[in-house]
Amino acid sequence: MVVALAVTAGLYVLPKGIVKPKEGKSEMSQQAARTANRDNGAAAPSTTSVEEAAPAGATAAQPHMTMAPAQRKEIDGLLAKYSAEQDPMAKLRVASDLATQYKAVEKFDSAGYYYEQLAVARPGEQTWKRAADSYFEAFSFAATEERQKMLAAKTRELYEKVLKNNPENLDAKTNLGMAYMASDNPVKGVTLLREVLVADPRNENALYNLGLLSIQSNQYDKAVERFRELTKVNPDNINGQFYLGVSLAKTNAKEEAKAAFRKAKSLSTDPALSASVDEQLAQLK
């Protein structure tokens, strides 16, 4: 319970990939804003033109991925077709095309909206999960706490439908757990993640997220435990090795931390990761 309550306020800035651990919450929030998608949350996407919906002067709270004119034109055409279409089956085909196009330009909640329309028409574990996964992507990159909470609520609603169809879907349960961390009941989020590990002690996603939550709450010994287990399950998990290094460094296990950082660097050709590792190694001298 202590872990859950401690991380709630800052969860929306948790890194989705590699983030330099010295960054403060404000810096991580800015990074999230730079990479967040810009669409319309849990509500129905606007049927105005995409050009109008993505103005050049977007703020940090509403960033967007620049679309090529051809992509904007195609989505505008599909939106007009979807609005005008009267035949239910034809409308669903357009919804599928819209979901695909929005996902391609990283407008994940708009994609989720149209995937949800397909799931309503053809309910089932996989159709609900496709919609839930899209909203979870949008939630993961939310640039503001208000938007994060809104998207988390929609994410929870849809993953609950997935689990109603199949209570053993551990990916859905893990993501539902993370979405609950942005709710008034974060304890349930931790409980769900732990339930995943009871069912599958080698579940990489659950180990990774519990490790991040431990870092966020400054429980570095627990983080070491989680990331050490993760890297036993999969020694080639780059993020696991990196955050194992971060956690070990915080517990003053410098030599082990260096080994973890070097392992992470050896697994990746990403220059940003390499620079982060070099910076961490320099601090451990």
Image: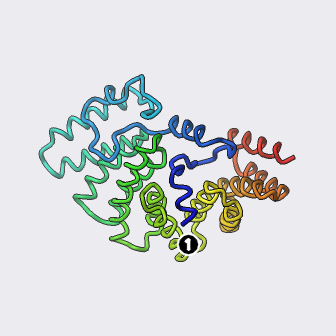
Q: Residue at x 54, y 66 (%)?
A: 1
Instruction: Identify which residue is drawn at 53% across, 51% down.
Output: 11
For the rendered model, the colour scheme is rainbow
Asked whether residue 234 is in view, the answer is no
Residue 260 point in image, percent of width and height = 76, 56
Counting from the top left corner in percent of width and height, residue 180 is at 44, 60
Residue at image location 53% in from the left, 40% down from the top:
32
The image shows residue 98 at horizontal and vertical percentages of 30, 43
Q: Residue at x 26, y 46 (%)?
A: 95
* Residue furthest right in the image: 285
Q: Residue furthest left?
A: 86
Q: Along the line of sight, which residue is nearer the eye, 33 or 165? A: 33
Identify residue type, mark 1.
Answer: Leu
Toward which corner of the image does residue 182 lie, by quadrant? bottom left
- The residue that mark 1 highlights is 197
In the rendered image, the vertical position of residue 280 relative to residue 75, given as above or below: below
Number of callouts in the render?
Answer: 1
Residue 258 x, y percent position in the rendering:
81, 53
Residue projecting furthest to the bottom: 198
- Name the side, left or right, on which 122 lies relative to 64: left
Question: Hey, which quadrant is residue 221 in on the image?
Answer: bottom right
